[in-house]
Amino acid sequence: MDSEVPETKDGSGPSAVSGPLARLAEVAVMAALRNTLTYLVPESLAAAPGMRVEVPLARRKAKGIILGEGKALPAGVVPRPILRLLGDQPLLTPDLLRLGRWIADYYIAPIGEVFRAMLPLRVEARRSARTRSADATMAGAGSACCQHTATTGGQGLESEGAVPFALAPAQDGVLAALSQALDAARFETVLLHGVTGSGKTEVYLRLISRCLAAGRTALMLVPEIALTPAAEAQFLSRFGARVALLHSGLTPKARDEAWWRIRRGEAEAVLGTRSAVFAPLARLGLVIVDEEHDSSYKQGETPRYHGRDVAVMRARLAGALALLGSATPSLESYWNAEQGKYRLATLPERVGGRALATVEIIDMREEFRQTAGQAPVSRRLHQAIRAQLAARQQTMLLLNRRGYSWFLLCRSCGQTLRCVNCSISLTYHRHENQLICHYCGYHIPPPPRCPNCQSQYLYYVGEGTEKLEKNLEELFPGARIARLDRDVARRQGEFQHLLQDFREEKIDLLAGTQLIAKGHHFPGVTLVGVVSADAGLAMPDFRAAERTFQLLAQAAGRAGRGSAPGRVLVQTFYPEHYAILMAAEQNYEVFFHKEMRFRRMMHYPPVTALANVIAQGRTLERAAAAARQVGSFLVPLESPTAGIKILGPSSAPLAKVQGWYRIQFLVKSNSRARLNAILRLLADNCEKQRLPRRAVVIDVDPLSVM
């Protein structure tokens, strides 16, 4: 959220009903409907809020969730009856019902689609005693996780009291303050700004232990499935069978079993990714969002919620403590802390007094002038890696672009091979020998000649992680080299196997994308090289500098986490850019204030509220027609005196994605309430104009305007 979590209702009214319903029920039907519908409750049905039902919808049947008592209908309107109950108990708690209402209202999303996202994947009407007995033996993850849980399940909280090491003074002070806030049993949001390696995770674990000991439950979110196993091992060793995991990497059956364990109160600590924010925990006392700045918390499709902001609202509704942690906080969260909306806690030093890695900037303009070459590894970085190998120390190289080459260029006519569905060049992947679109997955084999002019002079431009790996193998024969990016992570079991090998120092040199910069603890790494630090700065997005700073600072944080000091070499063509300089100094506060000057001047979040409205169609003509209708409603609402600015219509930076042509409006307002009111009116107008459901996309608090 750009400024703050809005206030919610106090729980009175329909959403607060918890007993059997009277004659009318308010139902969120799982269809593309923004509003709820009222149905008649047959006397034979013991319906209650949170229960799943089957209802008639036009000429078909649909599923829905009962939210509470239905509103009285106009005279002469006869409500249709609920057809049947799907289950004998409510699936969602009153807090989750209120949360779903808030998400639908805040993010201008169909309310039924919101509740669909909150339910387990496989919802059954009745669960047999045999199934329930089997569930009790499950820990909520795949088979490996279940076996681990079975061996550690007896430890539970007893193992928590035997934590074998003392906290650093800074950790101890932060934990004491957070414990006091937790014990107060009232809503508060705290931003924990701790440098990389400062021991945030141990603070999380001890706070969760205190929460469970007080008889309340705890939820912790991590941004990536890739980060879950490391946290999972710590959770299981500390809390045993009281833990449940929720993330999309699990099988549908495993996720379903974990959800039911939580719903029945068998799991009191939940660890998961974005969608785990909907875990049906009762007596919620603590919500932790680790790496709160990470863009993975933003849902890319309807409902387009932000997991961090929903987590804060979830804590508010439960009267719980919300703890947001990061070494590089989002500007929104740090702004909230500066404005007094969040409390700020800091861990300014690494555990054990270890120094942050020293950072050296390598000016690639000078490198090019001296060598007239375009090698991805500079002479200085090459020399440093050689020294690392001689000393038998580990190195990580970051290049945040996967594949082998960026695109295939014809030197005769200048054309590049582009995706047929998206306005983007295809990336060459050597392992598959395919040109692939990273947005829709379209792929073709490399042609022998240019499809445009039939020239044979085709040239592969740029380097991705796959090509970097090959270059490293040529530069350092005999070194143990591996690559980690999403192409590797998709291979079954490869990701964890590779991380384990690197942790056990069976790999000398690991090259990868941002996946290697996120939260990992590799004590053997003493050198981190950033191959192209400024790749993201050229993106036409107001968050480009923020993302660059965060990525570089997080990458630098992987070096020197063990007993030996760390070094970071940053290759860049823009060594004077403040995002590069402040990341090199690892000085978040200075970066924040420099970036905020730009945001204020250009009226971008967090100083204003922002929505991205995209009109789209399968043809450019249809997209333009939808844009005209959207523009005819939005543009007259622009008012400098009211603090409302409309930018557009204009072609989106990615003008075509997955076969949809896209025309963009940016709506800015200095009042969040005013912005949301405009967006609700826009959605109403689109329905009135009978625009197709996918013709207009409303993205509240967008993380990208691409």
Image (cartoon, rainbow, N blue to C red):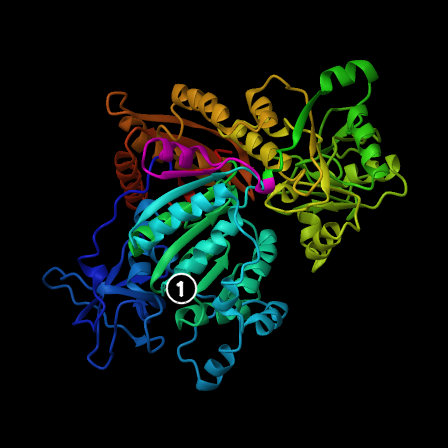
Q: Is residue 340 magenta?
A: yes
Q: Is residue 222 visible?
A: no
Q: Position of residue 455 (x, y in %)?
A: 82, 29
Image point 36% across, 65% down: which residue?
215
Residue 551 visible in the current orientation: yes
Q: How many numbered marks are there? A: 1
**Label 1's element?**
helix
Instruction: Give x and y (percent) for residue 483.
Output: 75, 45
Q: Is 346 rendered above or below residue 278?
A: above
Q: Which residues are magenta?
A: 329-352
Q: What residue is at 16 percent from the left and 61 percent from the top?
A: 71
Q: Quadrant of residue 86?
A: bottom left
Q: Quadrant of the N terminus?
A: top left
Residue found at the very far right of the displayed protein = 477
- Image-quadrant location for residue 399: top right
For label 1, the crowd category at 10 Å Cα-Cα, with few meaning under 14, some 14 to 19 and many 20 or more, is few
The outermost residue toward the left is 75
In magenta stretch: residue 194 = no
375 displayed left or right of 309: right
**Residue identified by numbered label 1:** 213
At label 1, which amino acid type do we have?
Ala
Nearest the viewer among 275 and 34 is 275
Q: Name the foreground residue: 273 vs 72.
A: 273
Query: Which residue lies at the image location 70% right of the left edge and 52% below the top edge?
Result: 499
Q: Estimate the x, y position of residue 12 in percent, counting from the top left.
A: 18, 57
